[in-house]
Amino acid sequence: MPPLLHPALPLLLGATLTFRALRRALCRLPLPVHVRADPLRTWRWHNLLVSFAHSIVSGIWALLCVWQTPNMLVEIETAWSLSGYLLVCFSAGYFIHDTVDIVASGQTRASWEYLVHHIMAMGAFFSGIFWSSFVGGGVLTLLVEVSNIFLTIRMMMKINNAQDHLLYQVNKYVNLVMYFLFRLAPQAYLTHFFLRYVSQRTLGTFLLGILLMLDVMIIIYFSRLLRSDFCPERVPKKQHKDKFLTE
């Protein structure tokens, strides 16, 4: 069925509007002192609150999908479940919302890396949504959201200038472990699968290209994470001031 007539469109629209409504509701919450005085930090705080909510829901949901349908771990192309399909639609809606939020807020230049990531993620998810292929792969990629829970906590504490807080010190080690378990490991597994089994197929080649670009981004982010949290003396002072949005 052509995408313009696809029944998944109401799901995507509903998910996108849900995140929009969530953002409006979260904007009513009180802001930390270090955040409310800066419009940019205020916008980023609200943006991260929505991201945090998405990570909690999607991360737990992805784990449940794998537990309910374990063949997603091996039948990445053909494994399918209603729960997994709805999860992919739900997360695609989040990426659509966040892309619109970044552009509408005038943060395109400062957050271009996020936009590139979102466009690639949506391109991959749409293959599962509109062609019902690689839904299992989409669910496995969303295991990264478990890691994003702790990564978002880290970024929110940095925006609030709370790097010296005990919670930040504990979280940076938990975040490192989760980064390995739920970001690097699934990404390496998926890359191995696509290189070995589906790289010669039309859709598989397209998804492999996206996956390899995401691999590069993940390695860059990981190097920034290590440098910022474990080798802060090697980070230029200007970056301490200007890179809180991405590091």
Image: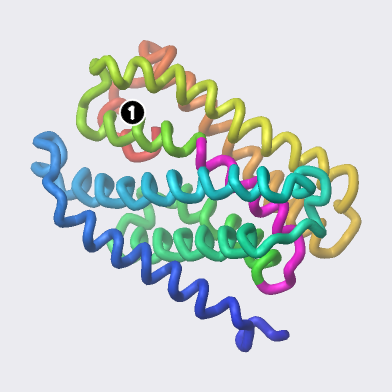
Crowd rating for badge 1 (residues with CA inside 10 Å; few <14, some 14–19, many 20+): few
Q: Residue furthest bottom?
A: 5
> Which quadrant of the figure contains the N terminus?
bottom right
Q: Which residue is mark 1?
A: 239
Identified at 82% across, 43% down, the residue is 193
Compared to residue 71, the image places residue 104 above or below, namely below
Identified at 51% across, 79% down, the residue is 10
Give the quadrant of residue 33. top left
Q: Position of residue 128 (x, y in %)?
A: 69, 64
Q: Position of residue 194 (x, y in %)?
A: 82, 47
Residue 153 shows in this picture: yes
Q: Which secondary structure dominates the residues rendered in magenta?
A: helix
> Which range is magenta?
130-146
Judge from the rendering whether residue 77 lies leftward or rightward of residue 85; answer left or right: right
Out of 213 and 50, give the one closest to the viewer: 50
Judge from the rendering whether residue 165 lies leftward or rightward of residue 68; answer left or right: left
Identified at 61% across, 86% down, the residue is 4
Out of 152 and 159, give the one closest to the viewer: 152
Q: Position of residue 76 (x, y in %)?
A: 78, 51
**Numbered label tally:** 1
Give the quadrant of residue 37. top left
Compared to residue 67, the image places residue 119 above or below, namely below
